[in-house]
Amino acid sequence: MADSAVHQRIAALAAEEHRLLQAHHDGSGLTEQERTRLREVEVALDQAWDLLRRREAAREAGLDTAMLTERDPATVEGYLS
């Protein structure tokens, strides 16, 4: 996946995240299904941003970025632990 495709994916996921959060701005809260989807979107955003950061670091080090792919959710979400 090219960087431009990753950027497009991030934009689409961010828009979905915004729609989910704005859908209940009246304080009614998200449904269980919406909370689950929001969490999925957040993880997918973390994965996409992680991939872009790793690609940038690889390019700066003069390495090939072709083999870099998204890391699994457990790895990306485990950074804060």
Image: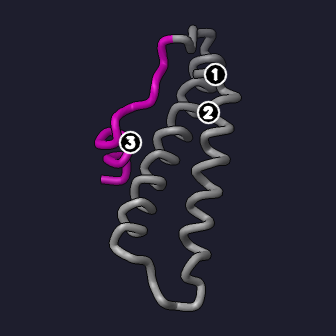
Q: Which mark is residue 2?
A: 1
Looking at the picture, the colour scheme in use is: one colour
Is disc 1 surrounded by few (<14), some (14 to 19) or many (20+) residues within 10 Å? Answer: few
The answer to which of marks 1 and 3 sits earlier in the sequence is 1
Could you tell me which residue is drawn at 29 percent across and 42 percent down? 74
Q: Residue 81 appears at what percent x and percent y? A: 30, 53
Could you tell me which residue is drawn at 62 percent across and 65 percent down? 18
Q: Quadrant of the N terminus?
A: top right
The reply, left or right, for residue 40 in relation to residue 12 is: left
Q: Are marks 1 and 2 in contact (CB under 8 Å)?
A: yes
Q: Quadrant of residue 3?
A: top right
Q: Are marks 3 and 2 in contact (CB under 8 Å)?
A: no
- Marks 1 and 2, how far apart in space? 6 Å
Q: State the SS at label 3.
A: helix
Q: Amino acid at mark 1?
A: Ala
Q: Amino acid at mark 3?
A: Val
The answer to which of marks 3 and 2 sits earlier in the sequence is 2
- Marks 1 and 3, how far apart in space? 20 Å
Q: Residue 34 appears at what percent x and percent y? A: 42, 68
Q: Residue 6 appears at what percent x and percent y? A: 61, 33
Residue situated in front as seen by the camera: 62 or 75: 75
Q: Which mark is residue 6?
A: 2
Q: Which mark is residue 76?
A: 3
